[in-house]
Image (cartoon, helix red, strand yellow):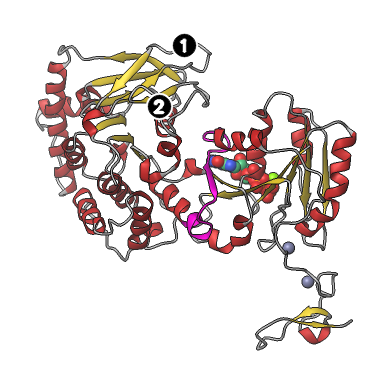
Amino acid sequence: MKLLIIAGPPSGGKTAVIRQVIKNLPEGSLPAFLKIDVVHATEDQELAEEFDIPVKKIYSGDVCPDHMGILVLDDALHWAESISRNILIIESAGLCLRCTPYTTYSLGIAVVSAISGTNSPFKMAPLLALADVAVVTKTDLVSQAEKEVFRESIRKVVPNIDIVETNAIQGTGLRYLMRRIADQPDIGPEPIVLRGAPPLGVCTICIGKKEIGWKNHFGVIRPLDMPEPLYRGD
Amino acid sequence: MQQFTPQQFTLTIQSGKNRFGEQEGFESIEIRPGDTLSIVGPTGSGKSALINDIENLAQGDSVTGRRILINGEEPPESFVREPAFKPISLITQNTRCLADLSVEAFMLMHIRARRPGREDLLDETINLANTFTGEEISLKSRMSGLSGGQTRALMIADALVIGDTPILLLDEIENAGIFKDRVIQSLQGGNKAVILVTHDPYLALTASRRIVMKHGGVSSVIEPTGQEQHLIEDLAIVEDRLHQIREKIRMGAAFSSGSSKVLMTAAAQGLQFNRV
Ligand SMILES: Nc1nc2c(ncn2[C@@H]2O[C@H](COP(=O)(O)OP(=O)(O)OP(=O)(O)O)[C@@H](O)[C@H]2O)c(=O)[nH]1
Ligand SMILES: [Mg+2]
Ligand SMILES: [Zn+2]
Ligand SMILES: [Zn+2]
């Protein structure tokens, strides 16, 4: 089983890239797809209809969707295996730019759009830094110079990352991504673990308490003029 | 940092298929420094796709299935993926820049990508850009605040000075509020191969070859035999007349019904040509 984890901010082009990936998978590939989102997603149905592949979707509700993704990943792999699939494609919600959903034994693909602003790579440094490949979409909407400047700003955040530029609607330039996917080894024998240490969403806001002010909460909290967060509770 | 001596540079386009799956109307097109090629055809006929195939150095992996060779071979990956090695500059139709940067910061980042260590090219680029536009661009301007004409002017200057590549692709430069003549003059200077998508009859005909697009593929490649020379000369006169009328209108002139008949027919002809 191969594992592809595709992450990136909302509307960056993750599903557009996944469509191209599914269309161009090496012969013998049997993909299954899992979408993780917060409250609303339709790509599971769309991809099932378009490619006739097994799909699943999970809503994370109040929990960080990347955390949710990690919680269900093991089950998802068992599911894909149980229906004799050999490649599991996971699309994250990408709402939490501090979390990175990539694990060991996965190909981590960060999808960012060329129109998201020159500073956006700095704002989502963890998402890029731990990825294997950065796919830059919507290059058809910017000039060549702007595309190259955007590439430069990704390089500033992660000097050696493999960058693939594409018009994801047409699939141009994705041959380099497809090569990475073809070369990606199957999941190995060791337990799968997260690559990075995610920031934990562990406070009572996470579970739905609405009061403002740290005095009303427990878990990891922070007064305004305290340099570090602190833990309150037991 | 330049990777090529232009003298030994050949780009080859190997044919692919049009939207109906039919083989294109040529086998291969070889392009060398100093060549100019125009690409003509109706909207949606595949002009930009051809330009994009060249820019991406497609290897049979785009919808058209074309292959682009450099010096007769499949180019190394760095030619496609590393701006510092890329032998091709493309000026697209996009006349808006979305980057949230000043002109200076943007250009310096582009220099870092294309020509590391050549920060001295910054002033040259801005100065050249300002010869292409009537609205002065300053280093402190925001990229996203530039007008369409200013952006175009800057992108062309960027391609010529910072890119300085043996191949230059232009997608309809004429619609952009720039001094077309000065741009064309600069393009012809540097022993580059220039490939331009155009609706402008004068630009289309003066190119040394003309690629005609239809249904997503190349339908023919026309090599002028000199028989179009008369037409080009006529067009030059029409262009000149049009230019004069345009200037007069700009200066507030009104025209009486008795205005030169020749002028009017010439203008009418010209307008027809321009309205493809
Ligand atoms: N022009 C252009 N549009 C693109 C490109 N990639 C994606 N889009 C469009 O951008 C929009 C968002 O793309 P999606 O693939 O749905 O983005 P996403 O990251 O999956 O979005 P969410 O899953 O909702 O977070 C869609 O309308 C796509 O058609 C591209 O390369 N060029
Ligand atoms: Mg999606
Ligand atoms: Zn998170
Ligand atoms: Zn929380």
Residue at 32% over, 36% down: B170
Along the line of sight, the residue nearer the viewer: B164 or B49: B164
In the figure, is residue B164 to the left or right of B131?
right
- Relative to B185, say whether B50 is above or below: above
Of pointers 2 and 1, the one earlier in the residue sequence: 1
Q: Which amino acid type corresponds to the residue marked 2 in the rendered image?
A: Lys
Callout 1 secondary element:
loop
Label 2 and label 1: CA atoms lie apart by: 16 Å
The answer to if A159 sits in the magenta stretch is: yes
Select label 2 or label 1 by which is in front: 1
Residue at 60% over, 34% down: A179
Tell me the residue that label 1 is attached to: B23
Where in the image, quadrant-wise, is ligand 2 located?
top right
Question: Badge 2 local density, few (<14 within 10 Å), some, or many (20+)?
Answer: many
In magenta, the rendered stretch is A153-173
Q: Which amino acid type corresponds to the residue marked 1 in the rendered image?
A: Gln
- Relative to B155, say whether A64 is above or below: below
In the figure, is residue A94 to the left or right of A207?
left
The x and y percentages for residue A143 are 41, 45
In the figure, is residue B36 to the left or right of A184?
left
The x and y percentages for residue A189 are 81, 44
Tell me the residue that label 2 is attached to: B47
Residue at 36% over, 53% down: B110
**Ligand 1 within 8 A of label 1's CB?**
no
